[in-house]
Image: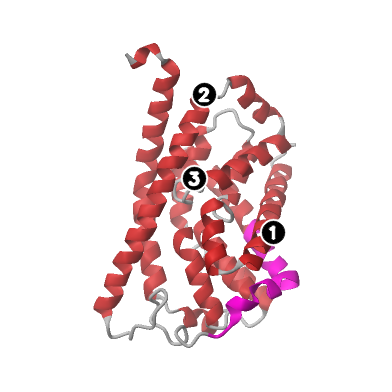
C-alpha cells in the first residue's frame, strides 16, 4: 500500500535511519555527560582555570574537546561554576564548547558524513563561535550575568551533584543522582531527536526539489534557513549531524550553520537558559550566539572557497 506513495516511503525510511543511527550516540553521551555533571565539583574549575580571562576563555573552549557534556546538563553546570567564582565568560564558553566540540560529537559527525573532513569543519566553526561568544561576554556582557555571579554557599565545596552539597563520602547518593540526571538528559535528548528526525524526514519528502536547489545555490539564504531550522528542531548535539547530512542538496555552509548554532542556541536551550541564567543573560547569549555562528560559518565558507 505504501508503495503507491513513494514520497511517504522515502520519509519513513529517512526517519527510521536517522533515529537508529543517532540513538547510540545519544545514549552514550547522556551517560558520560551525567557522570561529568555529578562527579566533578564545580569549585574545581575555579582552581584549575587560568586567572587571566582571555586565556581562561581559550582553555575553557579546549576543555570542550575532552568533556562530553550534553547541552541538557550544561546550563546547570555553568550556573554552578559561576556560583563557585568562575567568570561568566569562562563558564559560558565551557557550557557551549562541551556539547559542540566533545569527542563523541566529532565521532557522530564522522559517522553521519562518512569521513573526517566534516568533523574537522564542524570543530573549527564551533571553536570560532564559542570563543567569540566568550570574548563578547568579557568585553560587554558581564552585567547580564550579575545574578549568576552571587556566591552560593551550597556550591562552595560541593560534591558535584547538581543543585546540592552532598558529602563526598556518600558515593551511593552520587550514583543515584547520576541515574536521575541520565534519565532526564537521555529522555529529553531522545524526545527532541525523534521530533527533529520527523521534521527532517517530512521536509525531505514534502518540500519540492526546486526549493532545496535554491538552498544549494544561495549561500546566505541557506545559512539563514538552516539556522532557523537548528533553533526550531532543538536537537541534541549527538544527533544533529545525522539530520544535517539528510539535507541533500543544501549548500554546505547551511549545514555548517545548522551544526554550529544548534548546541549554542535553540528553543530548548533558550527555555533552560531563561530559567537557569535569567532573561538578560539569555537575550545576550541569543544575540551573540547567533551572530558568532553566522560569522564562523562565513569564515569557513571563505576558507573553503564556497562563496
- Res 306 seen here: no
Task: Report the side of 59 relative to 28 (left or right).
Answer: right
- Looking at the image, which is closer to me, 50 or 270? 270
Label 2, on which residue? 206
Please tell me whether residue 74 is drawn above or below residue 210 in the rendered image: below
Q: Between tags 1 and 2, which lies in front? A: 2
- In magenta, the rendered stretch is 128-151
Label 1, on which residue? 288
- Looking at the image, which is closer to me, 116 or 287? 287
Task: Report the side of 307 relative to 259 (left or right).
Answer: right
Query: Which type of secondary structure does the marked residue at label 2 adopt?
Result: helix
- On whether residue 129 falls in the magenta region, the answer is yes
Please tell me whether residue 296 is drawn above or below residue 154 in the rendered image: above
Q: Residue 212, how many percent across, how many down?
A: 61, 26
* Mark before the other along the chain sequence, 1 or 3: 3
Q: Is the image coloured rainbow, by chain, by secondary structure, or in one colour? A: secondary structure
- On whether residue 231 falls in the magenta region, the answer is no
* Mark before the other along the chain sequence, 1 or 2: 2
Quote the CA–CA distance across marks 1 and 3. Answer: 21 Å
User: Residue at 51% of width from left, 66% of height from top?
Assistant: 75
Label 3, on which residue? 240
Quote the CA–CA distance across marks 3 and 2. Answer: 20 Å
Q: Between tags 3 and 2, which lies in front? A: 2
Query: Which type of secondary structure does the marked residue at label 3 adopt?
Result: helix
User: Residue at 72% of width from left, 46% of height from top?
Assistant: 298
Amino acid at each position: 500500500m505504501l508503495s503507491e506513495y513513494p514520497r511517504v516511503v522515502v520519509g519513513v525510511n529517512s526517519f527510521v535511519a536517522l533515529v537508529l543511527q543517532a540513538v547510540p550516540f545519544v545514549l552514550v553521551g547522556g551517560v558520560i555527560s551525567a557522570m561529568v555533571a555529578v562527579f566533578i565539583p564545580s569549585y574545581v574549575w575555579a582552581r584549575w582555570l587560568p586567572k587571566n580571562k582571555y586565556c581562561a576563555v581559550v582553555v575553557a573552549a579546549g576543555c570542550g574537546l575532552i568533556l562530553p557534556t550534553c547541552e541538557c546538563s550544561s546550563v546547570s553546570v555553568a550556573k554552578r561554576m559561576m556560583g563557585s567564582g568562575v567568570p561568566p565568560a569562562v563558564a559560558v564558553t565551557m557550557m557551549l564548547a562541551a556539547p559542540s566540540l566533545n569527542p563523541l560529537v566529532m565521532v557522530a559527525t564522522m559517522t553521519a558524513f562518512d569521513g573526517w573532513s566534516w568533523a574537522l569543519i564542524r570543530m573549527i566553526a564551533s571553536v570560532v563561535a564559542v570563543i567569540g561568544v566568550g570574548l563578547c561576554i568579557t568585553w560587554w556582557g558581564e552585567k547580564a550575568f550579575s545574578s549568576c555571579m552571587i556566591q552560593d554557599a551550597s556550591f562552595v565545596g560541593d560534591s558535584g551533584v547538581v543543585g546540592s552539597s552532598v558529602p563526598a563520602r556518600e558515593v551511593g547518593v552520587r550514583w543515584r543522582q547520576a541515574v536521575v540526571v541520565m534519565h532526564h538528559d537521555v529522555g529529553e535528548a531522545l524526545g527532541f531527536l525523534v521530533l527533529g528526525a520527523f521534521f527532517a524526514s517530512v521536509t525531505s519528502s514534502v518540500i519540492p526539489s526546486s526549493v532545496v536547489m535554491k538552498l544549494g545555490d544561495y549561500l546566505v539564504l541557506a545559512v539563514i534557513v538552516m539556522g532557523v531550522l537548528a533553533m526550531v528542531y532543538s536537537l541534541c548535539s549527538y544527533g544533529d549531524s545525522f539530520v544535517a547530512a539528510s539535507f541533500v542538496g543544501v549548500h554546505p555552509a547551511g549545514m555548517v550553520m545548522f551544526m554550529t548554532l544548534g548546541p549554542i542556541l535553540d528553543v530548548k536551550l533558550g527555555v533552560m537558559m531563561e530559567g537557569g541564567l535569567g532573561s538578560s543573560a539569555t537575550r545576550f547569549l541569543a544575540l551573540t550566539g547567533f551572530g558568532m555562528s553566522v560569522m564562523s560559518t562565513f569564515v569557513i565558507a571563505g576558507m573553503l572557497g564556497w562563496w
